[in-house]
Structures are given as C-alpha cells and as structure tokens.
Image (cartoon, helix red, strand yellow):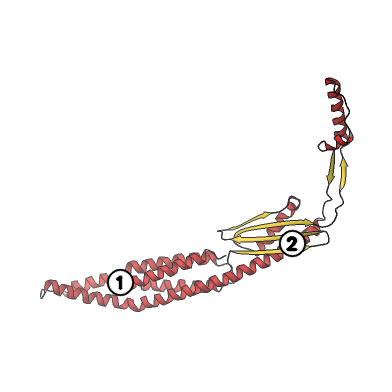
Amino acid sequence: MAYSMTGFGRGEASSDSRRLIVEIRSVNHRYCDISIRTPRMLSGHEDRLRRLISQRVNRGKIDAFVNYEEHGERERKITVDAGLAAAYIEASATLKGRFGINGDLSLSELLRLPDVFRADDPKPDEDEVWALLGQAAADALDALVSMRSAEGDKLVGDISGKLASLKAHLMQIEERAPFIVSEYRERLNDRLKELLGQNMPDESRVAAEIALFADRCAIDEEITRFKSHLAQAASCCASKEPIGRKLDFILQEINREVNTIGSKANDLSISETVVEMKSDAEKIREQIQNLE
C-alpha cells in the first residue's frame, strides 16, 4: 500500500482534570524529519512521542503540535522565601539609616517584591498525562495515516495509468523499429539512383553502409530493458512497503532508455513517440515526489 507524504490528523483525549489535543501535519521531504512543539511542562514526553510517530511514518516533514488544558480548581501551594524577605527588610533599614528616609517597609509592599511569595503548581501525574497524550497522538496518527493512504492510492492510480501509456508507446516503437532499416535502404537506393544514374556503386558497399546504419539505430536492447523497468515499476506500485525512493530510481532508468531510443532510432515517427513518453515520464516524476 502506497502512502502520500501529505496529510493531517487530529486527536483528543481528556480526563476529569485535563485535556490534551494533538495535531500532526506532514508534507514532502527527502527524509523523515519530525518536529514537536509541546508546552514546557510536557517536554519530558517529547522523545516518547517522537518514537510513536516514527513507528507509523517513514518519510516526510512531520510537525506535531500538543495543546494542554486543565479543568477545575487546582490546589496550589504558596511558598514564602523568609530569607529573601529578611534580606529585603535589612536592605530597607540600611537605606533608611544611610539616607535618613522615614517610614517602614509594610507587608503590602513586601508582597509586591519579586520572589518573596511563590505559587507552586502541583506536578501532574506523569503516567496519567502520557496515557492521555499517547491516546491523543495515536488518534491523530490514525487520521494522518488514513489521509496519506487515501492520497497515496490516488497517486499510484495515476502513476499506473501513466505507466500503461508508456507501455503503449513502447509497443508502437517496437512495431515501428523493424521498418526503419528497410525504409533507409529504399531511400538510400533511390538517392543513389537520382545522383549516379546507371553508375551505381558496388552492392557490397551499399550493404556495408546499410549494416552500419542498422547497427547505429538498433534499439532492441533498450526496448528489452524498458520492458523490464516497466514491470519493476508495476510491481513496486503493488508493494506494501514504502515505494517513493525505489520508484524514483526506476524512473531514472526509464528516462535513460527513452533518451537512448530517441537518439538512436533516427526516425521521425519514433521521435514523436519519444516526446510523448518524456511527457508521461515527467508527470510520473512529479507524482513520485509526493510518495513516501
């Protein structure tokens, strides 16, 4: 089964005290590049989340966003830094005596000084948080993979159609190829008669020229290799493994054979067919860039 590298998934999980939302987006990329954005309090779970994603996604630029919300009242603990408060009071008394300032440091003023009082949030239960985060991430990944799968099926269907077109064009070339030499022989003889009249050259020289031409324009090997590449591409499209890189390599070989056929055939009809084949190959290349 082929997968596109483009997709989106969202998952949500909640308990009585908190809710987590995970959104995962993916786009084309040469490798598997995972980027995770979480609140600071959840940073300890990033590695586990990264491993969870990498188990389901093999290739693409993956961006995961985690949103954390808490419900209801939270029991907070107020901590007083008595040492810091004493330091503030001593410093105030020093300034008062040195500069002759009247007044005392009041409690309300002391409350406004930095770090004297600190409200500490209770640390959430890590197992509970991961259970919710893992569930939300799994749901997001299910949706992401489902979208990538549906898109991948469409891409493979389009690629298969283009491969069928290449095969049809190759059959046209294969049917046309045997006539190239015989038509060249007729053109050569007609041209020689036009130029030389009855003073035709020795037949062995004409035969040697025709043999040389036949050798230069022979495309039997290219056609055989082309058929093999098409069969490999079709087999690849039916594979359950990631196929993007493999198809890309096969397409490079197909393009090589197309170019060689076009340069060797020395025939207008085949050249026109080669142009159509290059167009199909380019369309396949564009689609392959989206496959995992």
Return the x and y of residue 25 as percentages of the image width and height: 63, 61
Return the x and y of residue 285 as percentages of the image width and height: 48, 65
Q: Is residue 98 left or right of residue 265?
A: right
Looking at the image, which residue is at 46% across and 76% down? 164
Q: Of label 2 and label 1, which has the lower sequence position?
A: 2
Element under disc 2: helix
Please tell me the numbered disc located at residue 214. Answer: none
Looking at the image, which residue is at 76% across and 63% down? 13
> Compared with residue 25, is residue 98 higher up or lower down, i.e. above or below?
above
Return the x and y of residue 250 as percentages of the image width and height: 48, 67
Q: Say which amino acid is labelled 2.
A: Gly
Q: Is residue 183 left or right of residue 89?
A: left
For the image, the number of numbered tags is 2
> Compared with residue 106, is residue 9 higher up or lower down, i.e. above or below?
below
**Quadrant, the C terminus:** bottom right
Looking at the image, which residue is at 84% across and 42% down? 118
Q: Is residue 95 left or right of residue 148?
A: right
Please tell me the numbered disc located at residue 134. Answer: 2
Q: Say which amino acid is labelled 1.
A: Leu
Q: How far apart, in angstroms, are the residues tagged by discs 2 and 1? A: 62 Å
**Res 220 → quadrant:** bottom left
Callout 1 crowding tier (Cα within 10 Å): few <14, some 14–19, many ≥20: few
> Compared with residue 196, is residue 77 higher up or lower down, i.e. above or below?
above
Q: Residue furthest left?
A: 198
Element under disc 1: helix
> Compared with residue 14, is residue 153 higher up or lower down, i.e. above or below?
below
Return the x and y of residue 197 as percentages of the image width and height: 11, 74
The residue tagged 1 is 268
**Res 290 → quadrant:** bottom right
Looking at the image, which residue is at 75% across and 56% down? 68
**Quadrant, the N terminus:** bottom right
